Image (cartoon, helix red, strand yellow):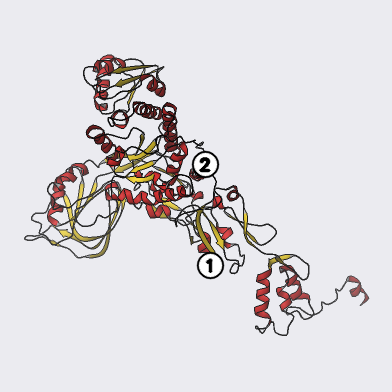
Amino acid sequence: MTAYKTLLLCSCDKTQSFNPKALQKAAAAAQVIAVDQLCGKDLNVAAEHLGADNEVLIACSQQSALFERLSEDVYAESMQAAPFHTIDIRDRAGWSAPDAKPERQHAKQAALIAAAQLPAPMAPAKTIQSSGVCCVVGPTEQAIRMAALVQDELGVTCIVNDAGPIQLPSAAYDVAKGQLTSAYGALGNFKLEFAHLQTLNPAGRGELGYGEAQPTARSECDVFIDLRGGAPAFPSHEKRNGYFWADPKKTGELERIALTARERVGEFEKTVYFRLEESLCAHSRAGKPGCTRCLDVCCTEAIFSAGDHIQIDSDICAGCGSCAAVCPTSAITMNETSFEAITKVADVMAKVYREHTSESPRLAFHTLGAGAEAIANLARYDDGLADDLIPIGLEHIDRVGHAEIMAAFGAGYAEVLILADNELDRRTVTAEVELAQALLQGTHNSPSRVRIISAIELCDAGANAGRVSDPILLVGGRRDITRVAVAAMSDKIEEPIPLPVGAPYGAIEIDSDKCTLCLACVSLCPTGALGDHGDRPEVQFTENACVQCGICDSTCPETAITLQPRLDVSKAALSARVLHGEEPFECIKCGTPFGVASTINRIIEKLESQHWMYKNSDNVQLIKMCGDCRVKAQFHGDSAPMAGGDRPRVRTSDDYLDS
C-alpha cells in the first residue's frame, strides 16, 4: 500500500460541480486535483499521477478502460504505475435536474466516495474443469449444423429428436436419436437422461439408419446446447453456466451460441457465493416438515432438501441471494453481498449525506447491469436521479429482503425504492417489500415509503427529503436490526404488529383443550423458541426466537398448535412465557410426581368402567402409580398378576450338618 492517495476530479467539460474539500475528506486523500476534461485535454494530468508512487482514485468510471490502457502505457515506459480505482459521481449525483440543490448533489458525491473506501468483501472460488464434451439436442438439421460449427473445439454428440435425414456420416461427431426426459447440473458436470435412444449406424450403403431403441439412457457432458425450441430444460436458464438455449428458427442464433460455446473448454473459476450453516437450518426435524422459504424462492433450483437441513449446489448457484434474503435463521449468508456489507455501505452514505445537509436522504437499490445502464441514460438524456436519492448497486436485486430495507430506515433514510429490471425480479422481491410495508404499518412511517419502482421514477423528487431521522446503531443480525429499527420508528407499540402469512416472525397458540403436554413440539423446535419446565409439565415460549418454521405445528399429534405471524418489539418478547401447563399427577404410593394430571384422569375415566381388565378390579390403581411403584405392585401384591409363590427358606451349612 502506498503512503498517500490522490483524488482526481473531472467536471466533464463543466457539466457538473463538486466540493473538492468535502470529497477529499470523504476519500481520505492527501491531495485533490480538479480538471475539466480528464479524458481529453487534461489526460496528461492522469498520466502524471498514474506514474507517481501513490494510490489514485479517479472520479470517472465512464472512461475506466481508457485509464487502464493509460496505466499500462505508463508502466511500459517507466516500469512503475500507481494502483488506481475509478468511481462514478457524475451519473449518480452530478448530473441531475436543473433545479437540483447543489448542496444535496455535493453531499451525494461525498457519500458515494466515502462508501467506496470500505473494504470489498472477498468471496472464495472453486475450480471447474471442462474437457469440452458437448451434447447438442434438437432437430436433425439444426443439430448437425451446430455440430459442424463447434466440432473443432468440442467433442460433440448430437441427440436428434425427429426423423430428419442425415446426408453423410461424419467421424467428427456422434449422432443418436431420442427424447430428452431430464437434465441436471452445470458447466463441467451435466447429467442428461433420454428415452428411446437409438444410435446411428454409419455403415452400409444408402440411407442411414438407427439401431435398436433403448428404453432409457443416461449421458454426461460438460456443455449442453439445447435447440429443441420449446421450454428450456432449466428455470432461469440464462443463469446456468454451460447451458445454451435458443430458438433454432431465429436467424443467426446457432452462430451466436457457437461463438460462446466454443470457449467453454479448460479450467474455470466459479465463485462460491454463499455460506451455509446447517446447524441453524430450520428446514425439518425428525422427518417433520418445516421452513421451505429458500426452496420456494431459488430461481435456479440449486437448493434441495437433505433431511433435517437443505443443501446448495455451488455449481448451479448463480449468486442472486434471494435465499439469504428470506432465510429466517441466517443459516444461508452471502459472501460477496453480505447483509453486514450492504448495511455498512447504506449506513456510511446516510451518515455523510446528513453531515452535509442535515436532511434524510432516500435510497434506491438497483442492479449493476440494467439498473446502472438505466441510471446512466436518465442522467444523460433526462433529469437524472433526484438530488436526495442515493443509489446502491447490487449484482442481483433479489438480494434485497425486508431486513435490508428496515436496516436502511434504521440508518436514517426517508424512503427505500427498489428498481426491478424485469417482471421476474419484481415478483421475486414483492413478498419482501410487502413484509417491510406491514412492519412499517405499526410505526409512524407510511408503508408507501418502501416500494418497487420503474426507472423513470428515479427522477421524482422526494416529499420527505427534509425530514431528519435519528439513526440507530446497526449492530447484530438480520432479525436483531429489524426488531430494533421497527422499535425505533415507533413512538409506542403496545400491541404486536400483524404480518402476512409466511413472515419469519410470530407467536404460536396452543389449544389447552387439545394439548396433552407430550412436549413433542419442544423436543423438535430448531431455534429453542419452545421450552419446558424442569419440575412440571409445561410449554414455555420465547417469541423473539420463533421463525414460524411450522415444525411444531406439523409435529403436534393433537393439532393443538396454530401459528400467528406478527412482530412483538416489546421486552416481553425476549423472555419465556407459559403457553400451557398443568399440575403433575402424584403417585399414590410414594408421592413422586409423574405424568399430567388431566391425562392420567382421562385414562382412568376411559378404562375404569369400559375395559374388562379394570372392571371390578384394583388394577386401576396401577395407573395411579409411578413406574417403580407399578412394577413393585405387579410382582409383590397379594393379588398381583405376576406374583410368584413364597420363596423357599434358604438352606445353610448347619442344615446339612444337622441332617
Q: What element carries label 1?
A: loop
Instruction: Name the residue type under label 2.
Output: Ala
263, above or below 608, in the image:
above
332, above or below 228, in the image:
above
Q: In which quarter of the image is the C terminus?
A: bottom right
Instruction: Name the residue type under label 1.
Output: Thr
Q: Which of 451 and 300 is in front in this view?
A: 451
Q: In which quarter of the image is residue 637?
A: bottom right
Q: Locate residue 257, reporting x and y percent.
A: 19, 45
Q: Are marks 2 and 1 in contact (CB under 8 Å)?
A: no
Q: Which of 92 and 644 is in front in this view?
A: 92
Residue ID for mark 1: 559
Residue ID for mark 2: 488
Q: Residues within 10 Å of mark 1 (few under 14, many from 20)?
A: some
Visible residue check, residue 299 = no
Q: Left or right of 311: which side holds 262?
A: left
317, above or below 206, in the image:
above
Visible residue check, residue 472 = yes
Q: In which quarter of the image is the N terminus?
A: top left
Q: What element carries label 2?
A: helix
Q: Locate residue 575, reporting x and y percent.
A: 61, 50
Q: Locate residue 260, reporting x and y percent.
A: 21, 42
Q: Left or right of 13: which side holds 487?
A: right
Q: Earlier in the sequence, mark 2 or mark 1?
A: 2
Q: Nearer the viewer, residue 182 or 276?
A: 276
Q: Residue furthest left?
A: 206
Q: Quadrant of residue 179?
A: bottom left
